[in-house]
């Protein structure tokens, strides 16, 4: 899978998780970019290209699930961990986020134990991020 394809898969999956809750926050968007660079190892050019409207607009959630299903196991685990981190960073999960996590895990052929490991890892990462209330000063 090319770096642009991985970046596209990541940003589609992350945006879907962020949009499944309330309006995506600046903290969630920043966390998605940080995760892309630090954990997935994507370069800045691929991240920018993947988020361009002309590139992203024609893609659907089915496209995202198809791309996610093609990820190697380790990369799929990283993407799932990041997606769950986005939800945990907001300190709550909405029903649409739960549904998206389930659909994505299914597309990646994840076992329950593998999914749970991703969730634990996501909790650890999310606990290191400032929560929206803290970032605002509340």
Image (tube, rainbow, N blue to C red):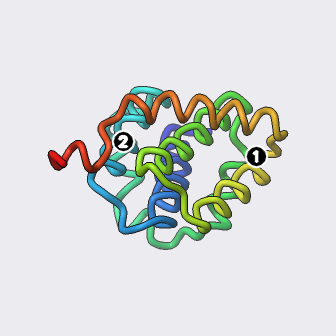
Label 1 neighbour load within 10 Å: few <14, some 14-19, many 20+: many
Classify 48 as above or below 96. above
Which quarter shows the N terminus?
top right
Quarter-of-image position of residue 64:
bottom right
Residue at image x 58%, y 70%? Answer: 60
Residue at image x 59%, y 33%? Answer: 78
Q: Which residue is mark 1?
A: 108
Left or right: 127 as drawn, with respect to 115: left
Q: Secondary structure at mark 1?
A: loop
- For marks 2 and 1, the one nearer the N-term is 2
Left or right: 89 as drawn, with respect to 65: left
Of 70 and 105, which appears nearest the observer?
105
Query: Comparing marks 2 and 1, which lies closer to the viewer?
Result: 2
Label 2 neighbour load within 10 Å: few <14, some 14-19, many 20+: many
Q: Which residue is mark 2?
A: 31
Quarter-of-image position of residue 44:
top left
Residue at image x 31%, y 57%? Answer: 25
Rendering coords of residue 63 (x, y %):
64, 63
How many discs appear? 2
Residues marked 2 and 1 touching at CB (< 8 Å): no
Q: Secondary structure at mark 2?
A: helix
Rendering coords of residue 5 (x, y %):
55, 47
Left or right: 116 as drawn, with respect to 128: right
């Amino acid at each position: 899978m090319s770096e642009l394809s991985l970046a596209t898969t990541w940003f589609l999956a992350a945006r879907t998780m962020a949009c499944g809750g309330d309006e995506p926050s600046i903290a969630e968007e920043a966390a998605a970019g940080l995760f892309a660079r630090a954990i997935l190892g994507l370069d800045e050019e691929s991240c920018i290209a993947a988020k361009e409207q002309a590139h992203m607009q024609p893609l659907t959630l089915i496209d995202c699930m198809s791309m996610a299903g093609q990820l190697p196991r380790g990369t799929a685990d990283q993407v799932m961990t990041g997606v769950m981190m986005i939800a945990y960073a907001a300190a709550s999960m909405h029903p649409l986020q739960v549904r998206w996590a389930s659909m994505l895990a299914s597309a990646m052929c994840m076992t329950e134990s593998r999914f749970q490991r991703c969730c634990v890892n996501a909790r650890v990462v999310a606990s290191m991020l400032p929560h929206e209330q803290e970032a605002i000063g509340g």
